[in-house]
Amino acid sequence: MDEITIKTSKKKEIIDITDTVNGKIEGSGKENGLCNIFILHTTASIATADLDPGTDLDMLDAFDKIVPKLIYRHPHDPGHVPDHIISTILGASLAVPFANKKLSLGEWQKIVLIEMNGPRKRNIVLSLLEEK
């Protein structure tokens, strides 16, 4: 198991972490297998995305439209309940195969951290299961 820490810089943003994850795989000594990527937070998510220019902003705008404006009851901070909801919908983990010490992604796929309540330090745990 390995951990990555990413510092986000905005309230809401999408950060490409593909190269960072690939670097951890390359340094692991494992050739082929499955990489599980798990974020240790409830207002951020892990996903795959196409990051053509502006796509990140389009996605963030769409996320804002998905969750209704309600009077939330969350005792800690009702204002960020939509962030919890979006993070739950998107998910906290992703399993991606790797081959030849590199993630097996489609041509346009990137592994992204989706920040919904930053800026913060976000911790991501990687588990690499080697194929025998």
Image (cartoon, helix red, strand yellow):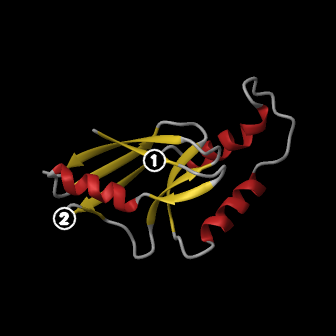
Identified at 73% across, 37% down, the residue is: 81
Tell whether 42 sits left or right of 64. left
Amino acid on which the number 1 mark rests in the picture: Ile
Q: Nearer the viewer, residue 20 or 98?
A: 20
Residue 80 higher or lower than 37, as above or below: above
Q: Residue furthest top?
A: 75
Q: Position of residue 68 (x, y in %)?
A: 82, 48
Checking the image for residue 100, the label placed there is: 2
Density class for disc 1 (Cα within 10 Å; few <14, some 14-19, many ≥20) is: some
Of marks 2 and 1, which one's residue comes earlier in the chain?
1
Against 56, residue 17 (above or below) is above
Q: Which residue is at 24% across, 46% downward?
A: 129
Which residue is at the front of the view, 14 or 64? 14
Say the numbered circle drawn on residue 114.
none
Mark 1 residue element: strand
Residue 94 in picture, x, y percent from top left: 43, 50
Q: Which residue is mark 1?
A: 6
Quadrant in which the N terminus appears: top left
Measured as percent of width and height from the top left, residue 63 is found at: 70, 56
Locate residue 111: give its quadrant: bottom left
- CA–CA distance in space, label 2 to label 1: 25 Å
Give the crowd class for mark 2: few <14, some 14-19, many >=20 residues within 10 Å.
few
In front here: 5 or 80?
5
Q: Identify the secondary structure beneath mark 2.
A: loop
Nearest to the observer: residue 1 or residue 106: 1
Mark 2 vs mark 1: in front = 1
The reply to whether the C-beta atoms of the residues labelled 2 and 1 are less than 8 Å apart is: no
Is 50 situated above or below 71?
Answer: below
User: What residue is at 56 percent from the left and 58 percent from the top?
Assistant: 14
Q: Is residue 58 left or right of residue 125?
A: right
